[in-house]
Amino acid sequence: MDAASQERRVRISRIAGRYLVFDIDDVVYIRRHHGICAVLTGTMPQNPTQNLFLSLPVELQADEARLLVDKGVGYIADELAEHMAQLTAADDSARKAYLQHLKQQRRHAQQVLDEERAKAQAMHLEKRKAAAASKAKALPPTSSSSEPSSSSSTTSTLEPEDSLFDPSPAPAAAAAPRPKQTPLPGITPTTSTALLPSATASSTPAVADTPAPSPPSYPLYRYLNARGYYTTPGLRFGGDFSVYPGDPFRYHAHYLANSYGWHDEIPLLDLVTSGRLGTAVKKSFLFGAAVEGASEPGGGGAGVGGGDGKAGVRVFCVEWAGM
């Protein structure tokens, strides 16, 4: 891990009780270095009504937000209070700087569009040249006696058609007047870091003091994350987590995990139904709880499938076998 990654602090925006990350660089960082996938929840500005391909921001589970705060690589910001404070205190210079930042983003977007348009035009021109060359090779050769007449007839016949596909520009008189300055495209910023410059500093006490959530399933989640497992919400499989041995882009889930309290009574029916359901979807059913009085939820040396009593969390697996 490089020095830039060690100094990065991910801004976790708390909005209406949800924990969101808007910066794409932060999303890549927490997935690559901390095994946190999160869930895409945003819609695309170009097609906001579709729901097959979602975009930024990503929503963190409460367990994931708490883990980043405990590791010291993230902080939770109350977006409503922070934005209201910054907008109230902003002066004219700050507003002008933010508008200038948006203009720079629009200029960059226009430059990218111009480059893509130039590449597309060059590709179409190459295709037309290749088609013309192949057509010229396919024409039969003409005799020398009929060459003058055929050339004159070809010229007279194809001259109007050739003028339609002539790549040379039209005369200035016939060309429509183009505007001197093309309006910049409209963009939708994904973050408000330019509007809130102080929120990106690692020494901001106002946002760093925002309390982190403490969900009951956090000890089990931290236990799995500390051992290199990736987790996603397990609702579609009937559990708290779907547990992967690596990035979900490369692996299928190996476990269906549920979290319990140390003194919770686990009904036998829950073990049967979860065990059979996990086996039906080709996964083992994993359940665990934090050891009462353990100071470090993610510590210890117990592996998946049992514990030695010294770990902060003890876990067990149930897999249905043939009768």
Image (cartoon, helix red, strand yellow):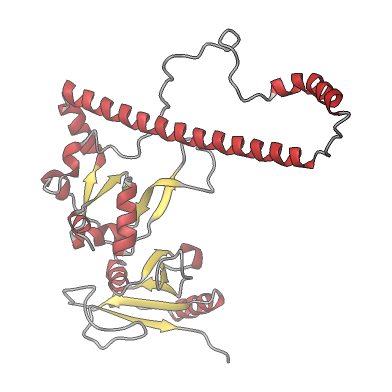
Residue 277: percent from left, percent from top = 53, 75
At x 31% / y 83%, what residue is drawn?
A: 303
Dividing the picture into quarters, in which one does residue 191 lie?
A: top left
* Near-viewer residue (118 or 5): 118
Relative to 219, is 303 above or below?
below
Against 247, residue 62 (above or below) is: above
Q: Residue at x 56, y 12 (%)?
A: 176
Extreme residue toward the top, this view:
173
- Quadrant into which the N terminus falls: bottom left
Figure quadrant of the C terminus: bottom right
Residue 180 percent coordinates (x, y): 43, 14
Q: Is residue 290 above or below residue 56?
A: below
Which residue shows up at 85% across the image and 26% down it? 150
Q: Can residue 187 be seen in this view?
A: no
Q: Which residue is outermost to the front?
A: 145
Q: How many labels does the image show?
A: 0
Q: Residue furthest right?
A: 145
Q: Is residue 67 found left or right of 167 in the rendered image?
A: left
Q: In this view, does 11 lie to the left or right of 35?
A: left
Residue farthest to the bottom, as pictured:
323
Residue 261 x/y as whole percent: 30, 73
